[in-house]
Amino acid sequence: MKIIVVSDYERMSEEVAKIVQAQIAVKPDSVLGLATGSTPLGTYRKLVEMAKDGLDFSQVTTFNLDEYVGLAGDHPQSYRYYMEQNLFSGVNIPREKTFIPNGTAADLAAECAAYEEKIKGAGGIDLQLLGIGSNAHIGFNEPGSEFGSTTRLVDLAESTIEDNSRFFASREEVPTQAISMGIKSIMQAKQIVLMANGENKADAIWATVLGPVTSDVPASVLQLHPFVTLVLDEAAASKL
C-alpha cells in the first residue's frame, strides 16, 4: 500500500488527476472505475482542464461504483447526472462507453448481474478510483459487507444516509437503497486509488491502513490488494 500525503484538497485532487492522466497515456483504451460524492469533484475538474489541453478520453470506458435505487438518470441527485455535470460533458468520451447502474431497472437483480458481465466484457477495470465514507465504506459497501460480494442491491447505513443528506433538500428524500459494485468487484481492479480529505475521515483512514482486515471496516480489505495508492490530505492522514 502506497500512501501519498499532500497539504490540502487541491493538491490531493491534482495528484489523483495526474495518476488518471498517466494511466490513459500508457493505455489510451483504459477502463476506469469512477466514484462520486464530494471527494472526487476536484479531480474531475482537473481532468476536464487536462482534456482541454489534449488529454484524450475517446477510447476510454468507465464504470461507476454505484447508483441510488429509484432515481432516474436525469434526476439532479442521481450519479448519472453527477457524472454528466462534473466530468462527461467536459471530456470527449463517447456516452456509450460510460456505464452506471440503472437504479430504476424493473429487475434490479438482473441489472446487477448484467453490470458485472459488462465489466468482464470490457476486460476488467484498469484503475479504480475510490472515496471513503466516515464509516470506512467503499462504494456503498457498508460495514458487514462480505469480501466476496459482487454488484448487488444494498441497504444504506444510517450514517451514510445522514452524510448524503446534505445533497438533498431533506433527509427524508435520501434513497435508502442503492446498487453498488461489491468488495470483490472492486478488488478485481488492476490498480486502486483511494482519496480522502478532511479530519472527519481520519479515523476511517487509520482503521483502513493500520487496523485489522475486517468486514466491519470495508476499506481495510485494500491491505490485501497488490497495487493500492492512498492520496490523503494532511487532515485525513493526521492519525497515521
Image (cartoon, rainbow, N blue to C red):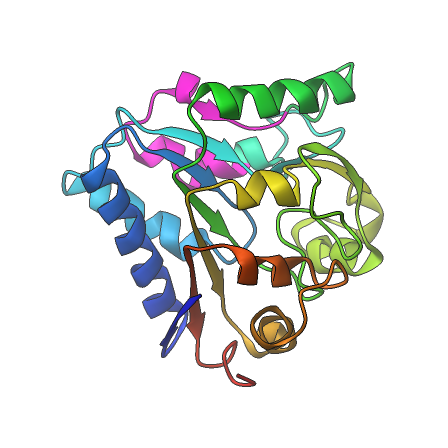
Image quarter of residue 160 = bottom right
Nearest the viewer among 155 and 119 is 119
Q: Measured along the vertical axis of the image, is residue 193 above or below residue 54? A: below
Image quarter of residue 175 = top right
Q: Residue drawn 62% across and 53% down? A: 138
Q: Residue drawn 28% across and 28% down? A: 29
Q: Measured along the vertical axis of the image, is residue 174 above or below residue 104? A: below
Nearest the viewer among 7 and 220 is 220
192 on left or right of 182 = left
Nearest the viewer among 76 and 227 is 227
Q: Is residue 79 magenta?
A: no
Q: Position of residue 129 (x, y in %)?
A: 46, 49
In which quadrant is the N terminus drawn? bottom left
18 on left or right of 239 = left
119 on left or right of 24 = right
Q: Residue drawn 71% across and 60% down? A: 163
Q: Position of residue 178 (x, y in %)?
A: 73, 37
Magenta segment range?
A: 82-101
Residue that protrudes farthest toward the bottom in the picture: 239
